């Protein structure tokens, strides 16, 4: 972590720190928790995803980070003791990642002044009223590699020509047997539905998990969507410049 193997960190008693968690790997998944005594996990308050502030804070016990995903979380220290930043086992489909300790957090004195919990602020972003096309992107893998809409991945092939300005609805469909991060380079988007349901959405650049109870009201935009096996995700995207690639 930050170039170190299981570093030791310090946080003051009752102090609230902002931790920016970034998965800078190309294919490793992390299921991050902060573990205290008797394996109990401390709460993490997520306030931003992919550099985009959430409209309302999200209180969780674990943060799943796929390749390239970033999360800003508030961590409040207990009165005393030691905590372990750990990644839990995670089955990505094609690869299983084991549990591992990432860092040790020591609680020190003097105690800090406790801060009030963050509240809801701002509004979700709006999209241009002018509507463009609805596009479905079907992702799968064969022995030859990645396939999109039954076509092998070809970086020099142009698969879509959206018009500049209008809002398009894109439906990425993961037909593979593994979790896959889906993103559009440079552009943010908002997740609207997962498998036809608005429940379970994280509105940032595009991370999706249908088994989590979340709503699109928690965030503004995302960069990456975690797409589960056979999961269909509906999202809105407004094209702001000329060339985009995704994966």
Image (spheres, helix red, strand yellow):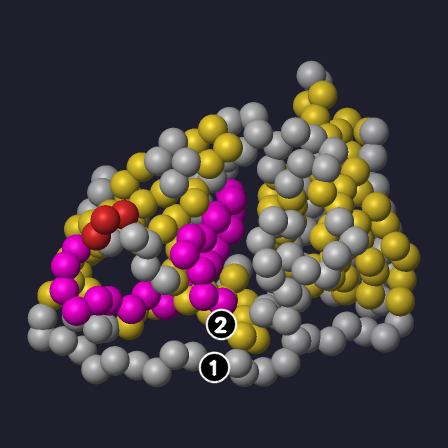
Residue ID at (9%, 70%): 109
Q: Are marks 1 and 2 in contact (CB under 8 Å)?
A: yes
Where does the image place residue 99, in percent across and percent down from the top left? Answer: 35, 35
**Chain part drawn in magenta:** 57-82
**Element assignment for label 2:** strand
The mark total stands at 2
**Residue 76 within the segment the image draws in magenta:** yes
- Residue 146 in sight in this render: no
The single residue placed furthest to the top in the displayed view is 143
Q: CA distance from mark 1 to mark 2?
A: 7 Å
Crowding near the residue tagged with mark 2, few <14, some 14–19, many ≥20 C-alpha atoms within 10 Å:
many
Crowding near the residue tagged with mark 1, few <14, some 14–19, many ≥20 C-alpha atoms within 10 Å:
few
Judging depth in this view, the residue of 113 and 39 nearest the camera is 39
Precedes in sequence: disc 1 or disc 2 = 2
Residue ID at (50%, 32%): 91
The single residue placed furthest to the front in the displayed view is 38
**Circle number at residue 119:** 1
**Element assignment for label 1:** loop
Judge whether 168 appears above or below 130 on screen: above
Q: Which residue is mark 2?
A: 57
Residue ID at (89%, 72%): 130
Where does the image place residue 185, in percent across and percent down from the top left? Answer: 65, 51
Judging depth in this view, the residue of 132 and 114 nearest the camera is 114
Q: Is residue 139 left or right of residue 95?
A: right
Q: Where, by quadrant of the figure, is residue 202 drawn?
A: bottom right
- Residue 87 in sight in this render: yes
Residue ID at (68%, 75%): 125
Where does the image place residue 3, in percent across and percent down from the top left? Answer: 28, 44
Q: Where, by quadrant of the figure, is residue 137 drawn?
A: top right
């Amino acid at each position: 972590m930050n170039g170190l193997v299981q570093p030791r960190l310090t946080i003051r008693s009752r102090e609230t720190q902002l931790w920016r968690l970034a998965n800078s790997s190309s294919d490793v998944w992390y299921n991050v928790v902060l573990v205290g005594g008797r394996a109990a996990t401390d709460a993490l308050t997520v306030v931003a995803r992919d550099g985009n502030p959430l409209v309302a804070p999200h209180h969780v016990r674990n943060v799943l980070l796929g390749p390239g995903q970033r999360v800003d979380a508030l961590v409040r220290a207990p009165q005393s003791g030691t905590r372990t930043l750990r990644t839990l086992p995670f089955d990505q489909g094609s690869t299983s990642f084991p549990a591992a300790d990432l860092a040790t957090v020591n609680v020190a004195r003097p105690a800090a002044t406790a801060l009030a919990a963050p509240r809801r602020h701002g509004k979700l972003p709006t999209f241009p009223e002018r509507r463009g096309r609805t596009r479905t992107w079907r992702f799968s893998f064969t022995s030859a590699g990645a396939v999109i809409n039954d076509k092998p991945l070809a970086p020099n092939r142009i698969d879509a020509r959206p018009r500049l300005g209008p809002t398009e609805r894109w439906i990425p469909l993961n037909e593979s047997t593994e979790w896959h991060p889906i993103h559009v380079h440079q552009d943010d988007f908002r997740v609207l539905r997962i498998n036809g349901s608005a429940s379970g959405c994280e509105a940032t650049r595009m991370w999706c998990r249908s088994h989590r109870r979340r709503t699109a009201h928690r965030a503004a935009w995302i960069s990456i969507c975690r797409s589960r096996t056979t999961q269909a995700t509906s999202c809105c995207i407004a094209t702001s410049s000329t060339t985009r690639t995704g994966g």
